[in-house]
Amino acid sequence: MNQGDGGAKEAHVINLQSQIVRIATEAKTQAVAAAFFDYETDTAWSYRGDAWFHAASTIKVALLVALFAAVEDGRLDLDARVHIRNRFLSAVDGEPYRVPAGRDANGEVHAAIGKTLRVKELAHYMIVSSSNLATNLLLDLIGVEAATRTLAELGISGIELRRGVEDEKAYERGINNRITANGLIRLFRLMHEERLFSPEASRRMLDTLHQQAFNSGIPAGLPGEIREHARIAHKTGEISTIAHDAGLVFLPKRQPYAVAILTEWGADGNSQQETVARISREIYEDLIERV
């Protein structure tokens, strides 16, 4: 790389970071982090990439990986049936709690209470429509310790899985699932490069993530004519003070890029997904200009 190339890349870095800071300031966020790895240019970049955030539903990607690890090891079968119940034990004191139907983005798993669903159906609902009930059922099957051990064995740092979702007692005690932008990039890279498990398992996980139903973050940031032909395998995460999106963006006639955008807000925050989309657009434009 000649000196001119280095200067151009440094200018890109400075400009992208300043644009993200500007967007975050205009939106009045409390914190923002972003990272990408571009396979087309072999370029990695991050802004506050190791800063910790409440994971919200992005932790479900880590659980999906732990699920497929259990399947690959023969501990679980994707076609096995699971009794659907709504009773879980708090990470604080072991007392039972439930996932309120009104706080779940998916109603189909709640409608199946007292019946059974296959493991692969729960995995689909957990990712595609972000079912909290499906998430907790799968976490109970796998176990928090086993899932954490899987992430450590795979060398995935920057992601902490500590409890089920809607465990209010744990939330009040500060026991939360946490992620970093760099941690999510590492996870998606391993998945895309088929370095987690078998190629078939990696493809199945990506196929599920490609079906994501909530697309107002990373996908919305792409220009309309590009978005129409793009394929995006991603997972959003949103609660009252958090809005995240992370995944892999496959564009026509170029190699894909992995991207993670994390935002934290005050209690009166608004335009969360719009802000994620604006940052997604800045990253897309930066990458296109690099080629």
Image (cartoon, rainbow, N blue to C red):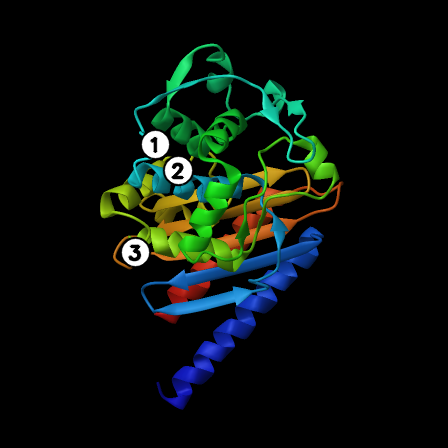
Q: Looking at the image, is mark 2 or mark 1 nearer the viewer?
A: 1
The residue closer to the viewer here, 74 or 85, is 74
Residue type (three-letter) at the residue carrying disc 3 = Glu
Return the x and y of residue 270 as percentages of the image width and height: 68, 41
| Callout 2 touching callout 1 (CB < 8 Å) | yes
Q: Locate the N terminus and report the quarter of the image it occupies.
A: bottom left
Lower sequence index among marks 2 and 1: 2
The residue closer to the viewer here, 189 or 158, is 158
Residue lying at 34% horizontally and 51% vertically, measured from the top left: 191
Q: Distance between the residues labelled 2 and 3?
A: 18 Å
Q: Distance between the residues labelled 1 and 3?
A: 24 Å
| Callout 1 touching callout 3 (CB < 8 Å) | no
Return the x and y of residue 266 as percentages of the image width and height: 74, 46
Q: Locate the C terminus and report the quarter of the image it occupies.
A: bottom left
Looking at the rendered structure, the number of numbered marks drawn on it comes to 3
Toward the bottom, the furthest residue is: 3
Element type at mark 1: loop
Disc sitting over residue 76 in the figure = 1
In the figure, 149 relative to 16: above or below?
Answer: above
Which image quarter: residue 74?
Answer: top left
Residue lying at 47% horizontally and 19% vertically, measured from the top left: 109
Return the x and y of residue 155 as percentages of the image width and height: 43, 58
Disc sitting over residue 67 in the figure = 2
Element type at mark 2: helix
Lower sequence index among marks 1 and 3: 1
Residue type (three-letter) at the residue carrying disc 2 = Leu
Query: Circle 2: is it few (<14), some (14-19), or many (20+) Cα within 10 Å?
Result: many
In the figure, 84 relative to 139: above or below?
Answer: above
Q: Name the residue under label 3.
A: 193
Q: Is residue 85 visible?
A: yes
Query: Circle 3: is it few (<14), some (14-19), or many (20+) Cα within 10 Å?
Result: few
